[in-house]
Amino acid sequence: MAGLVLKSHKRQNVARYTRVWAGILLSAVFLFPVFWMVLSSFKMQRDIFTTPPLLFFSPTLESYISNIQRTDISRRMINTVIVATGAGLLSITAGSLAGYALSRIRIKGAAAMGVLILMSRGVPPIALAVPMFLVARKLRLTDLHITLILAYCTFLIPYVMWLMRGFFISLPMELEEAAMLDGCTRFGAFFKVIVPISIPGILSTLIFSIILAWEELLFALVLTNRKASTIPVAIAGIAGDTVNGANWGALTTVGTMTVIPVVIFALLVQKWLIKGLSDGATKG
């Protein structure tokens, strides 16, 4: 009997170590391009094209200094922060209200309505970008932060609505009913009772929304020119320079400068992010 228990324990350990090493291997595979991008950003231009590739070299900050001194990079970084934050906040507000309505208000076809709104995310972005540009040009709203924020909301709100709907469904309706018996309106019960206990889910959804808006390229490329242009547009411009060949030093440097704020942001909010994901998993 003891031998069987020992063998079972060994099999469990082997399975656990296998999962751990498989996770490490997969993480290494997916993170290697990011590692190579960061490593190449500290190389001289001639070292980037060395064959075989160099793992050990004399690092330099020349590419960072030259790109930071370019006013358009710093301005585009600020634009990206403004647009991503604005789109995230606006989307979490509208999407939470829509998700709450679909989860609580008993109307015929509410589930189908939610599915249709979610399916709007399946529309190719290029199918929306051109009409948006024509409307924005007609209204003289091109190259403005608010135009880009509203454009981003078209694909963020369905995402937020569906996630928050699932979160609100997991909450007992007795909470709002008790608040409304005490004199609260439906809106009052939502803001005073539901929102405070839904903060983890709201924050985790907001974080994902900001990250999605941070990396968006097509709408920013179509709807902006210079004043509201974002950092992904700068990366696309560097990559698309085919006259003298792509400047890989600048490309890896700007790419690293784009990734680092997202990583720092994720590390700062990881407590709320993990709590929101775990609460959603246990409540769902």
Image (cartoon, helix red, strand yellow):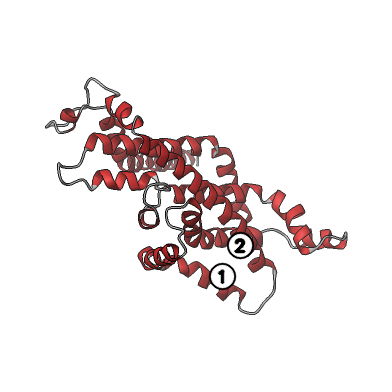
Looking at marks 2 and 1 on the same chain, the residue that comes earlier in the sequence is marked by 1
Mark 1, residue position: 114
Say whether marks 2 and 1 touch (CB < 8 Å): yes
Q: Amino acid at mark 1?
A: Gly
Which one is nearer the viewer's eye here, 167 or 135? 135
Which one is nearer the viewer's eye here, 31 or 258? 258
Tag shown at residue 74: none
Q: Residue at x 28, y 29 (%)?
A: 63
Q: Residues within 10 Å of mark 1 (few under 14, many from 20)?
A: some
Residue closest to the far bottom:
108
**Residue 119 seen by the camera:** yes
Q: Residue at x 50, y 37 (%)?
A: 265
Residue closest to the far right:
182
**Residue 4 seen by the camera:** no
Q: Is residue 55 left or right of residue 21?
A: left
What is the x, y in percent for residue 142?
Answer: 43, 57
Task: Measure the alpha-carbon separation of dots 2 and 1.
Answer: 9 Å
**Quarter occupied by residue 183:** bottom right
Q: Is residue 32 left or right of residue 190?
A: left
Which one is nearer the viewer's eye here, 14 or 188? 188
Q: Is residue 28 left or right of residue 272?
A: left
What is the x, y in percent for residue 100?
Answer: 66, 63
Q: Amino acid at mark 2?
A: Arg
Check disc 1 and report its element: helix, strand or loop: helix
Check disc 2 and report its element: helix, strand or loop: helix
**Quarter occupied by residue 185:** bottom right
Tag shown at residue 165: 2
What is the x, y in percent for residue 101?
Answer: 66, 66
**Quarter occupied by residue 25:** top left
Above or below, comparing residue 86 to residue 59 in the picture: below
